[in-house]
Amino acid sequence: MNLSIVVPLYNEEESLPELCSWIKSVVDQHGYTYEVLLIDDGSRDDSWKVIQTIAASNPNIKGIKFQRNYGKSAALNEGFKAAQGDVVITMDADMQDSPDEIPALYQMIVEEGFDMVSGWKKKRYDNTLTKNIPSKLFNAVARKSSGIKLHDFNCGLKAYKRKVVKCIEVFGEMHRYIPVLAKWSGFRKIGEKIVEHRPRKYGTTKFGWDRFINGFLDLGTIMFLGKFGKKPMQFFGLYGTLAFLIGFLTSGYLMVAKILDPEVGITNKPAFYIALAVMIIGMQLFLTGFVAELVARNASERNVYLIEEKLGLEEA
Ligand code: UDP
Ligand code: MG
C-alpha cells in the first residue's frame, strides 16, 4: 500500500464527507493505493455515524473510535500504530489542510528520500492575535531548543516514512513536537513544504489560549527527556551539587569569620539566609535526581534501541 492518511477528529461531522471525497479524488487521480484512517477522538456529535456511512461505501476508509476524548496526540498515536502504507500522511479533519498537497508530500518522501516532511502554513487563515503571533514565538523557541529548522512545528499536515511513525510514541500533547521526537529517534532528514492553509469551514477550533502555556511546558519536558530522560542524575546531581557547594562554602566562610572575631554578627547578614536556602535547595535537587534515577531504571522502555539495519542476521 502506498499511502496511509491519518485524520484525528473531534466533533467534525460536517467536514468528514467533503474531506473524504476530496482525498479520494486526489488519490485516485494519481493511482495510489491507500487507506484513510479516521480516528474519532470521542466525538460527541454524529461523527462516528458519518464515518460508518462513508466506510460502508468505500473500503479504503477505516475508522477507530475512542471511548472518550483523549486528545489529538492519542488519536495520532493510534493512527500511527494502525497505518500500513509506505508513506503516512497526517491531516486535520476540518479541511484547513488541503488534500491537494498529498501528491507533492508523497513524492518528497519517496523520491527525495525525506524521513519526514512538515507542512508550513506560510499564509494562515486564523485569528492573528490569539494564534499567529503566539505561534511565531512558540516556533522560534522550539527551533532554537531543538535545532530543527522548521517554521511551523504544529502544522497538522505532515508526511512520514512508515518506519518513522512506528518508532515514535506520541503522548500527552506531544503532537506539536513530532519532528523533535523523530529527531531523537535518529531520523535526520526532516524537510519542510509550504502548504496551502484554508479557513475553517465548519465547526470550531478545539484548542484555546491554554495551548501555548501547555505547549511550552511540553517543550521543556521533551527537551529534558531527550537529553536526560535516561540519566536524570547528571542533571539534578550537577545543579544540586553546585547549589550545595555554594551554600556550604558561604556558610563556612561566615563561620570562620565568627570564630576569628566573635563580635561579628552572622544572623543579621542576608548571605547567611541565602546560604541556608541554597544548601537546602541543593539537597532537594540531589534527592530528586536519585528518585528520578530509580524511576528511569524501572521504566519499561529503558532499553529500546532502534536498529536501522542488520547484516548477516536473519530478520525476526
Ligand atoms: N482534534 C482531536 N482531538 C482533540 C482536539 C482536536 O482529534 O481533542 C482534532 C480536530 O478535530 C482537528 C485537529 O485535531 O481535526 C486540529 O484541531 P483544530 O482544527 O481544532 O486546531 P486548530 O486548527 O485550531 O489549530
Ligand atoms: Mg483547524
Image (tube, rainbow, N blue to C red):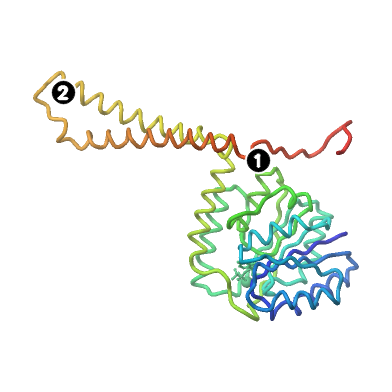
Q: Is 184 in front, or is 66?
A: 66
The residue where tag 1 is placed is 301
The residue where tag 2 is placed is 258
Q: Amino acid at mark 1?
A: Glu
Residue at far right of view: 31
Q: Quadrant of residue 34 in the image?
A: bottom right
Ligand 1 is within 8 Å of the C-beta of the residue at disc 1: no
Q: Earlier in the sequence, mark 1 or mark 2?
A: 2
Q: Residue at x 55, y 50 (%)?
A: 144
Looking at the figure, which quarter contains the C terminus?
top right
Q: Residue at x 69, y 60 (%)?
A: 76
Q: Residues within 10 Å of mark 1 (few under 14, many from 20)?
A: few
Q: Position of residue 95 (x, y in %)?
A: 69, 75
Q: How many marks?
A: 2
Q: Position of residue 250 (x, y in %)?
A: 27, 28
Q: Amino acid at mark 2?
A: Lys
Residue at far left of view: 263
Ligand 2 image position (quadrant)? bottom right
Looking at the figure, which quarter contains the N terminus?
bottom right
Residue at far front of view: 67
